[in-house]
Amino acid sequence: MNILDTFSLKGKIALITGASYGIGFAIAKSYAEAGAIICFNDIKQELVDKGIAAYREEGIKAYGYVCDVTKEEDVKKMTAQIETEVGVIDILVNNAGIIKRTPMLEMSPEDFRAVIDVDLNAPFIVSKAVIPGMIKKGHGKIINICSMMSELGRETVSAYAAAKGGLKMLTKNIASEYGEFNIQCNGIGPGYIETPQTAPLRVKGNPFNDFIISKTPAARWGRTEDLMGPAVFLASEASDFVNGHILYVDGGILAYIGKQPG
Ligand code: NAP
Ligand code: GCO
């Protein structure tokens, strides 16, 4: 087999959570280009409809589902619907996520819990719903969208960092527990990427914008396109012996102390 064939996702059924736009949409697009059948969800019907239209504009017939990934019954129903309408899921990307930027002492336990619920509990819930089908099929790929905050902290993102740090370890645990069933579970740790989630950080004059550029050897914000190749690699046979790994796609932030003054 030609080495490039091992990167093909032809005929694979992929579920990308929270993928009406942003990073999830870009990953879904790359999977479609690699031959996969795309399933995605969002919380609101209007967003699912917008997502289906956006995929159609890219020439992709995507299957969209309204589902709050924090609700196990919703997730079980969506998984069963996909298995009936499309087929058993081969590739799961736990992408759906939220962030609340509040100094910890001002953050309510409810807000802290809300972030943990979407960013950590939901990947557990969705993976739990999808793994049995992967075991029956004899293979599966789970990719968890981690973060720089799986490794680093910063002011105002205590809940998000706790969730993404936990997601790194959940990734390693799923890899450990289900590797024997030919299921590989890995993470992607995006750097600072231009999406709606980081839009507040990129507004003109926000010093954080220049700070991130000074901390990134690539000297730029990441683009969702930068994640497409790594995501295809981790979803394909090319990574069948990669398991429990977090692949940081960050332009070098984690390797760099930051631009020297002067
Ligand atoms: P985004 O633009 O805010 O999109 C997040 C998506 O998740 C939206 O479609 C959102 O739907 C959906 N979502 C949120 N809560 C949900 C729930 N309970 N059930 C179902 N869907 C839900 O975020 P993004 O920047 O694309 O980030 C995607 C993932 O990458 C997140 O896990 C984020 O933590 C991670 N990440 C982002 C960056 C970055 O720099 N952007 C870097 C590292 C990691 P609604 O629109 O309905 O809320
Ligand atoms: C923030 C940003 C980051 C990015 C990303 C970095 O407020 O620091 O939102 O958390 O979203 O997770 O990898």
Image: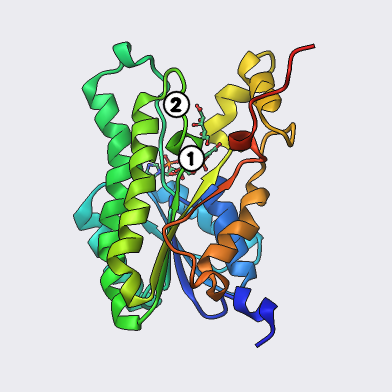
Q: Nearer the viewer, residue 81 or 113?
A: 113
Residue at horizontal 67%, vertical 40%?
251
The residue wearing badge 2 is 153
Q: Would you say residue 55 is visible in this rendering?
A: no
Q: Where residue 6 appears, x then y in whole percent?
A: 61, 78
Residue farthest toward the right in the current orientation of the protein = 262
Q: Is residue 129 left or right of residue 222?
A: left
- Helix, strand or loop status at disc 1: loop
- 207 vs 78, left or right, is right
* Residue 202 drawn at (x, y percent): 63, 24
Tag 1: residue type?
Ser
Image-based side of 64 in relation to 220, left or right = left
Q: Position of residue 234 (x, y in %)?
A: 53, 63
> Distance between the Cα atoms at labels 1 and 2?
11 Å
According to the image, what is the colour scheme of the structure?
Answer: rainbow
Crowding near the residue tagged with mark 1, few <14, some 14–19, many ≥20 C-alpha atoms within 10 Å: many
SS under mark 2: loop
Give amino acid for label 2.
Answer: Gly
Question: Residue 147 got which mark?
Answer: 1
Q: Quadrant of the N terminus?
A: bottom right
Q: Is residue 167 above or below residue 127?
A: above
Query: Ligand 2: does it lie within 8 Å of the C-beta at label 1?
Result: yes
Quarter of the image with the C terminus is: top right
- Report the front residue among 94 and 195: 94
Q: Residue at x 32, y 60 (%)?
A: 174
Mark 2 or mark 1, which is nearer the start of the sequence?
1
Q: Are marks 1 and 2 in contact (CB under 8 Å)?
A: no
